[in-house]
Amino acid sequence: MPRTLSPSTLRAQVAAIIAGTGSTPSEAEQVAANLVLANLSGHDSHGVGMVPRYVDAAAEGGLKPNASVRINLDSGTMLALDGQRGYGQIVGVQAMALAIERAKQHGSCVLSLANAHHLGRIGHFAEMATAQGLVSMHFVNVLSRPVVAPWGGGDGRFGTNPCCIGIPIAGTDPFILDYATSRVAQGKMRVAHNKGERVPPGTLIDEHGAPTDDPGVVVVPQSNGLFGALMTFGEHKGYGMAVACELLGGALTGGGTWHRPADTARTVLNGMLAIVIDPGKLGTQASFEQEAQAFVDWLRRSPPGQGFDGVQIAGEPERKARAARERDGIWIDDATWDEIVAAGAKVGVTIG
Ligand code: NAD
């Protein structure tokens, strides 16, 4: 039976499983809180459904519980860090905390973070920056089975390489643009496949390079043992952004790019290049606040287009989802729940 769980119940159950991978109680709680926040934000793809993958990755040795960032270089405005394969929810937060501190001190910080295990929802890091009145931009690559086809190509060559921009807006909620450069996140295909749903045209190609609406082509091996692939958003433009994320998040950070055949490893590593800016130190704070607020108000006054309730600003759908799911609970489909229960069993934790 699908179930609806309160955020606190889900956090406790997930924390128990993460602790079973070897994490300290406080690390397990932080990872669980981050995953549940992704569910609350409406991004089930980056929520507790990732737990089975993390359990397998820790068992493989590709994910190292209780790791911290190692500082390879710290020149004040430039920070080069190695996540040492620690939980992304931990090393990503450590890295951003350092970058925020440096940006407040010097006006800006270029952060490179290599070898973080899956960083989850990248918007989490932009929200850390905007909460302090800072702007942040994030370019991320994904070292895992390549699931996204290059524009014009017929198989998966890179990951869902997310890109994120956070901008504080005076007097109102921040702009948090946070998306995979694939048409949809890979995790959303897992969720759709688990729910038995089909996906819109233009999202996927099958293992022969032909268009399909079956999310299973990127979730389970097809008849010939190969997988299909996701397409990038925005045709050649989204493709270009995905490549930029690979070059900046993978090559420039030192974490590396993907250029080898797919393997079956469960470990997912992310590289992230982030740029954090303190508008207060750029000399434009007053006009920035005024102009950003005026522009957002201007957008909101656009009359609703046909089939829409009105204009939203990036970050708003996630905040609305949080309010609704905090109130109503988090719905988990059968297949996802069964996978989580089985993951718990692998580390000796019974949930139900
Ligand atoms: P998505 O397609 O749901 O797009 C989300 C973005 O669009 C958000 O900024 C949201 O506020 C904005 N948005 C949505 N509807 C809107 C509307 N009507 N008006 C204005 N703005 C609107 O997101 P996605 O591509 O499915 O990505 C989901 C999550 O997956 C992201 O948090 C991303 O960081 C994460 N991700 C992580 C990895 C990783 O390896 N760590 C890889 C891929 C994606």
Image (cartoon, rainbow, N blue to C red):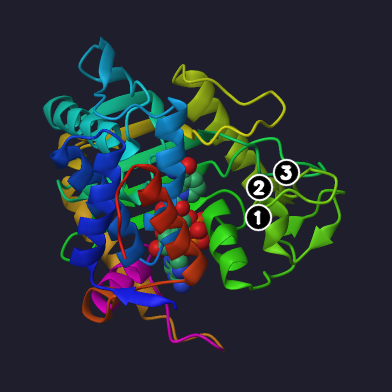
Q: Amino acid at mark 2?
A: Lys
Mark before the other along the chain sequence, 3 or 1:
3
Report helix, strand or loop for mark 1.
Answer: loop
As displayed, is residue 202 above or below residue 258? below
Which residue is more in the foreground, 295 or 262?
Answer: 262
Residue annotated with mark 3: 149
Label 3 or label 2, whichever comes before in sequence order: 3
Which residue is disc 1 drawn over? 234
The front one of 259 and 163 is: 259
Residue range highlighted in magenta = 307-324
> Which residue is at a point 33% across and 76% down the rendered structure image?
4
What is the secondary structure assignment of the residue under circle 3? Answer: loop
- Residue type at mark 1 is Gly
User: How far across and down, in percent of the image, does residue 77 sit?
Assistant: 24, 20
- Residue 319 highlighted magenta (yes or no): yes
Q: Quadrant of the N terminus?
A: bottom left
Question: Is residue 100 visible from the viewing direction of this image?
Answer: yes
Q: Between 272 and 32, which is closer to the camera in this rendering?
A: 32
Q: Which mark is residue 237?
A: 2
Q: Residue at x 41, y 49 (%)?
A: 343
Q: Is residue 178 visible?
A: no
Residue 146, disc:
none
**Image coordinates for residue 281, horizontal then vertical, percent:** 16, 34
Q: Residue at x 65, y 53 (%)?
A: 219
Q: Would you say the beta carbon of the disc 1 residue lies within 8 angstroms of ligand 1?
A: no
Residue 25 shown left or right of residue 164 in the figure: left
Q: Between marks 3 and 2, how big is the CA–CA gap?
A: 13 Å
Q: Residues within 10 Å of mark 3 (few under 14, many from 20)?
A: many
Quarter occupied by residue 289: bottom left
Is 263 magenta? The answer is no
